[in-house]
Image (tube, rainbow, N blue to C red):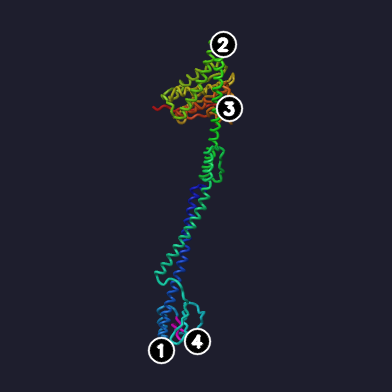
Amino acid sequence: MFHSLRFRLLVAVILVVVAVVGGIALVSVQVTTRTFQDYEDRRGALRDRRFQTFLSMHYARHGDWSGVQAEIERIGQITGERVILANRDGRIVADSEDQLIGQMAKRDWPPPTAVLMHRRAPVGALYVDVPNLPGPSGPEGLLRSVNRTLLLVALGAGLGAVLLILGLSRRILAPVEALTAAARRMEAGDLSQRVEIASQDEIGDLAHAFNRMADGLARLEELRRNMVADVAHELRTPLTNVRGYLEAIRDGVVEPEPRVIDSLYEEAMLLNHLVDDLQELSLVEAGKLHLVRQPLAPADLVDRAVEAFVPRAEAKDVTLQVEVPEDLPLVDVDAQRIGQVLRNLLENGLIHTPAGGQVGVTGRLASGGRWVEITVWDTGAGIAAIDLPHVFERFYRADRSRSRATGGAGLGLAIARQLVEAHGGRIGVESEVGRATRFTFTLPVAEG
C-alpha cells in the first residue's frame, strides 16, 4: 500500500494542500496582525494629536497650565490609560492619577503610560512625542491593505504549489516517459527494448508487464521466423520427392508403376495434411471454427480414438491401456474435434515411446462434477523442463532436427490446445525426462 502510486499521489496532494493552506494561513495571520497593529497605532497617534490640539487650545486660553489637571483626568478616563503632562522643562504639571505632579518626567517609563511632553515649543503650542506612523487611514484602508497582502500571499503560495507539483509529477511521471520512449522504439521495430524497474508501485507493475510483453513479442518474432523456415522445410521435402518422381517419369527413367504412384500419393497427402493443419489452426485461433457439440460418453470418444492406433502400437510393440469409467457423465463436445485432440496426443505418445513401453488414457470426474478430466500418458523419453512451457506453441519441437519421425511439423499439440480451449477446457503437461509424460485436458459436463 505504501509503495502504490495511489498512495504517493495522495501524499503529494496532501503536501501541496498543507503547504499552500498552511503558508497562506501563517503569513495571513502575521500580516493581518501587523497591519491591524499598525492601524491601531495610527489611530492612537491620531487620538494623541487630537488631545495635543485640545491641550494647546487650553494653554492658549489660560496662558499657562492652570486647571489642566481636570482635563488630564478626563482624558485618562476616556483612553483608559494613565496620562501625564510635562512642561518644557520636563516637570510634570498634570497626572491623571494625581501622584507625580511636580516630579521630573522619565521618557523610559513602561507602557501603558502615555507621556505628553510640552517642551521645545513656543507658548500656545504643545509638542507631543508621537511618531508619524504610515498605514491605512481608516477601516477601508485597513481592508485594502489586508486584501492586497492576502492576494500577494495567495499568488506566492500558488507559485510554490505549482513548483512543488512540477517536482512531484516529474518524479512520478519519469518512469512513464521512459516506458513511452521504449514503446516508441519498439514500435519502430527494436524488440530489444526493456525498461529498468525502480519502484514497486503501479508504474513498477506496468514496467514488469512491458518487459514481459517485450519478451513475448521477441519470442513471437523468433517463432515467426522459425515458422517460415519450418513451413519451407516441411514443404520442401515432399515437393522435392514429387518433383523428382515426375522428372524421372517424364524422362522415362522410372515407369509410372503402382509403387511410384503410391509414393507420390503419400507425399501429396503429407502436403495436404500440413496445409489442413495450418488452416485449421488459423481458424481456431481466429475463433471462426464451427463446433458441432452434442452430449457424448467420454469412454466412447476414447475407445474410437484408441482403436485407430492399435495396429501401429502392435507393430511397434507398445501396449495401449484405457481406463475410462463407463459411468462418467456425458460431455458437451464436438466428437470430431475432440477425437482429433486424442489422436494428436496418442500419436505424440507413440512416436516418443520405445518398443516395450506403454501408452494409456485415463478419465475421471473433476472440479466438483463440472468437468471430465482426460489424461493421455506414455512411458517414453519425456520432455525436458526447458521445453515444457513451449510444447503447445506452433512449430515448436524439442528436436531441432525437424525430422518428421520425431514429431512432425510441430502443429499437433498447438491444434490440440486450441481445440480444447474452444470447448472451454484447459490442457496441461507434466513430464519427467526418461520416464513418463502426461497430457491432461478437461471437457465440460453436458447439462441436464
Q: Which mark is residue 398?
A: 3
| Residue visible at 59% across and 29% down in the picture | 384
| Residue 24 picture location, percent across and down | 46, 61
Considering the numbered disc 4 on the image, is that residue within a helix, a strand or a loop? loop
| Residue 431 picture location, percent across and down | 57, 28
Q: Is residue 140 visible?
A: yes
Instruction: Please say if the residues under marks 2 and 4 sit with CB atoms less than 8 Å apart.
Output: no
Residue 148, magenta (yes or no): no
The magenta region covers: 83-97
| Residue 244 picture location, percent across and down | 57, 16
- Foreground of the two, 371 or 46: 46
At label 3, the amino acid type is Ala
Please determine whether, in this image, residue 368 is positioned above or below residue 23.
Answer: above
Q: Which mark is residue 62?
A: 1
Nearer-N-terminus badge (4/1): 1
Residue neighbourhood size for the residue with mark 2, other residues' Cα within 10 Å, grouped as few (<14), some (14–19), many (≥20): few
C-alpha distance separating marks 2 and 4: 152 Å
Q: Which residue is mark 2?
A: 252
Considering the numbered disc 2 on the image, is that residue within a helix, a strand or a loop? loop
Considering the numbered disc 1 on the image, is that residue within a helix, a strand or a loop? helix
Please determine whether, in this image, residue 218 is positioned above or below residue 416.
Answer: below
C-alpha distance separating marks 4 and 1: 19 Å
* Closer mark to the observer between disc 2 and disc 4: 2
C-alpha distance separating marks 2 and 1: 158 Å
- Foreground of the two, 67 or 279: 279
